[in-house]
Amino acid sequence: MRRLNAPLVVGLVLTAGLVALLVLPELVALPDPHVGVHVQMEGRKLRLAPFAPGEFGYVLGSDMVGRDLLSRVIYGARYTLGLAAAVIGLRAAIALPAGLRAGWAGGRAARIVQALAVGFGSIPALALVAMTLGGLRWLVPGQKGWLATYVAMLVLSGAPSMAEQVRRRAEEILVMPHVEAARALGATPWRILRRHVLPLMRADLAVMFSSEMAWVLLLMGQLAVFGIYVGGTVAVRGDGWIRYIEYLPEWGQMLGANRTAILGSPWIPFFPGLALGLSAAAFHLLAEGFRLQGLRQG
């Protein structure tokens, strides 16, 4: 009897849940994630935000200015998962050509890829990205410039190791008999890579992309805890009070901007952090499931 691939099943279920979050705003009318009700009437008393989970119809509670946290978490899936997917796409755009080139040519190209992977891998990604972005934060003009810098550092922190993985796998495939036969018959490098190498790397790439997605989401959450996240804050003024809040409902920004509220209103940073953690777990389980599936098939 064939054993159940539990990590793959759980990973697919959790990933399906993330996909559902992406399309849910199109199917269900949700409160505007940017608009909140700062004052609510409770009997004869006026209550000021934030409101705890379950109060005044807020399932997950509200943030500091009365915005619905459930709505912001659901809308935030698009920003956070889209940002992480963009980072992985840019990493792949750099790593795949570089790794395949190094695997095919060997020599200096292979040594360069190896050296970069060892160099970037010798420093923990969190320390590397946090120190670099922390030093650049006040030097980068505007939110668009900061977003580009943030994404660039996430891409560069992982592209060398991905390229090294591609290089090693390409070298293993290139010594297979049918690939060597194609080279002896005079097939062009592009044809060999397209027809023989890349098809055999599909399982490896599925594992790699899922694992990288998990690590990027985890890194975004860790950076947010240190106050490093995309976007910025806006000032909301009332009668005798002023509060600085995050604008975009992006999970990292929601966690980072409200991390100091953990003692007074813990639900505000908790649920975005939980969403990041569950998303990273989903892709990690997916990667493990793909790995086990590949071992069973081959």
Image: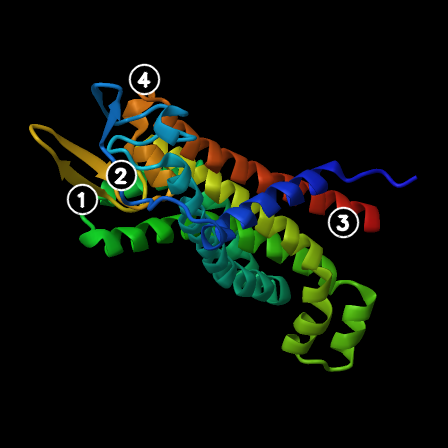
Q: Which residue is mark 3?
A: 294
- Which type of secondary structure does the marked residue at label 3 adopt? helix
40 and 226: which is toward the camera: 40
- Which type of secondary structure does the marked residue at label 4 adopt? loop
Residue 138's disc number: 1
Q: Is residue 196 left or right of residue 51?
A: right
Q: Which residue is mark 4?
A: 263
Among numbered discs 2 and 4, the one appearing first in the sequence: 2
Mark pair 2, 4: CA separation: 22 Å
Mark pair 1, 2: CA separation: 30 Å
Mark pair 1, 3: CA separation: 46 Å
Three-letter code, disc 1: Trp
Residue 36's disc number: 2
Three-letter code, disc 3: Gly
Three-letter code, disc 4: Leu
Alpha-carbon neighbours of circle 3 within 10 Å: few (<14), some, or many (≥20)?
Answer: some
Residue 285 location, x and y as percent? 64, 39
- Which type of secondary structure does the marked residue at label 1 adopt? loop
Residue drawn at x 27%, y 46% is 231
Tag in front: 2 or 3: 2
Which residue occupies the extreme front position in the image? 43
Among numbered discs 1 and 4, the one appearing first in the sequence: 1
**Vertically, is 145 above or below 258?**
below
